[in-house]
């Protein structure tokens, strides 16, 4: 692991986001970067991720996080001593991360996740918080899994976190939720589902004091666990474990309140 830098290292731009899906996801992240940490605050589960990764890799191991965002996962991992790299499509998200990481503990890369090629491999490639679902079409998800595989060391691990789509798949009308933003407003989130294509239309409207309302929309494609295994197989990754959370709870499916944490190894 390299010595901690005294200044934040520059973000490298490896592959500019391309395609409609990447552009849509990037625009959505740009719009939410200002309030992201307040809408999705840190939870004890973030510490659980670091403890979980230590069951797979040695202390100080290299970790590549896809969709690093504002560093909610990456910074606790760096605090545990991991060598952390993070990839993100949104400059605004990376700017927020840089504000929280003046020591430059996380090396960041601005680029398209599906076309990523950093020219090296990592002990762990981590895709938390439904990052795989941000690829809105099957071909994009296949490309993303190939990108994951080519960045995984031969003895390394791939760890993904996706939501169980069981309840969403039968959703008949939009679900609306309100997320408070401290003392300055709220974000109203509406989710509609297209079961035939497994797409979710997510629209967030920001209502902040002193600012005109503004909206951002993105599209996700949810993955069934068996479909995730198939994508892994296409990229020559084999499933070795699956849990309903970072504390290795048994996964039995059928409950969208539970997450699906999957561990893969490269096929030899």
Image (tube, helix red, strand yellow):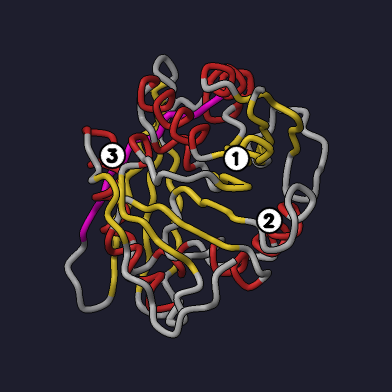
For mark 2, does the 10 Å Cα neighbourhood hold few (<14), some (14 to 19), or many (20 or more) residues? some
Of marks 1 and 2, which one's residue comes earlier in the chain? 2
Image height of 204 relative to 206, above or below: above
The residue closer to the viewer here, 206 or 112, is 112
Give the quadrant of the N terminus.
bottom right
**Which residue lies under the disc numbered 3?**
22
Q: Residue furthest bottom?
A: 6
The residue closer to the viewer here, 255 or 15, is 15
Circle nearer the viewer, 3 or 1: 1
Q: Quadrant of residue 6?
A: bottom left
- Residue 221 image offset from top left, x and y in percent: 42, 29
- Residue 21 image offset from top left, x and y in percent: 28, 34
- Residue 142 image offset from top left, x and y in percent: 43, 23
Q: Main secondary structure of the magenta part?
A: strand
Q: Quadrant of residue 262?
A: top right
Q: Which mark is residue 153?
A: 1
Q: Is residue 83 magenta?
A: no
**Which residue lies under the disc numbered 2?**
49
- Secondary element at image label 3: helix
The residue positioned 81% from the left and 42% from the top of the image is: 249
Image height of 187 relative to 140, above or below: below
Left or right of residue 27: residue 45: right
For mark 1, does the 10 Å Cα neighbourhood hold few (<14), some (14 to 19), or many (20 or more) residues? some
Circle nearer the viewer, 1 or 2: 1
Mark 1–mark 2 CB contact (< 8 Å): no
Of marks 3 and 2, which one's residue comes earlier in the chain? 3
Q: Which residues are magenta?
A: 214-224
The residue positioned 50% from the left and 36% from the top of the image is: 148
The residue positioned 60% from the left and 40% from the top of the image is: 153
Give the quadrant of the C terminus.
top right
């Amino acid at each position: 692991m390299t010595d901690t830098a005294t200044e934040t290292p520059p973000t490298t731009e490896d592959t500019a986001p391309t395609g409609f899906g990447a552009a849509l996801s990037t625009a959505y992240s740009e719009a939410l970067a200002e309030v992201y940490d307040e809408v999705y605050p840190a939870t004890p589960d973030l510490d659980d991720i670091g403890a979980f990764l230590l069951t797979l890799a040695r202390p100080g191991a290299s970790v590549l996080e896809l969709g690093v965002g504002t560093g909610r996962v990456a910074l606790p991992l760096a605090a545990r001593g991991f060598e952390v790299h993070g990839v993100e499509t949104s400059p605004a998200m990376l700017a927020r991360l840089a504000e929280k990481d003046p020591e430059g503990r996380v090396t960041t890369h601005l680029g398209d996740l599906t076309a990523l090629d950093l020219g090296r491999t990592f002990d762990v490639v981590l895709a938390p918080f439904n990052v795989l679902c941000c690829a809105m079409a099957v071909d994009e998800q296949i490309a993303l899994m190939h990108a994951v595989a080519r960045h995984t060391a031969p003895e390394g691990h791939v760890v993904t976190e996706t939501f169980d789509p069981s309840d969403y798949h039968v959703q008949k009308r939009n679900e609306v939720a309100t997320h408070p933003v401290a003392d300055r407003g709220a974000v109203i989130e509406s989710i509609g589902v297209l079961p035939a294509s497994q797409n979710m239309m997510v629209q967030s409207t920001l209502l902040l004091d002193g600012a005109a309302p503004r909206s951002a929309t993105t599209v996700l494609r949810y993955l069934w666990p068996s479909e995730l295994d198939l994508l892994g197989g296409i990229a020559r990754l084999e499933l070795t474990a699956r849990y309903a959370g970072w504390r290795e709870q048994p996964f039995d499916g059928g409950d969208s309140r539970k997450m699906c944490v999957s561990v893969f190894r490269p096929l030899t």
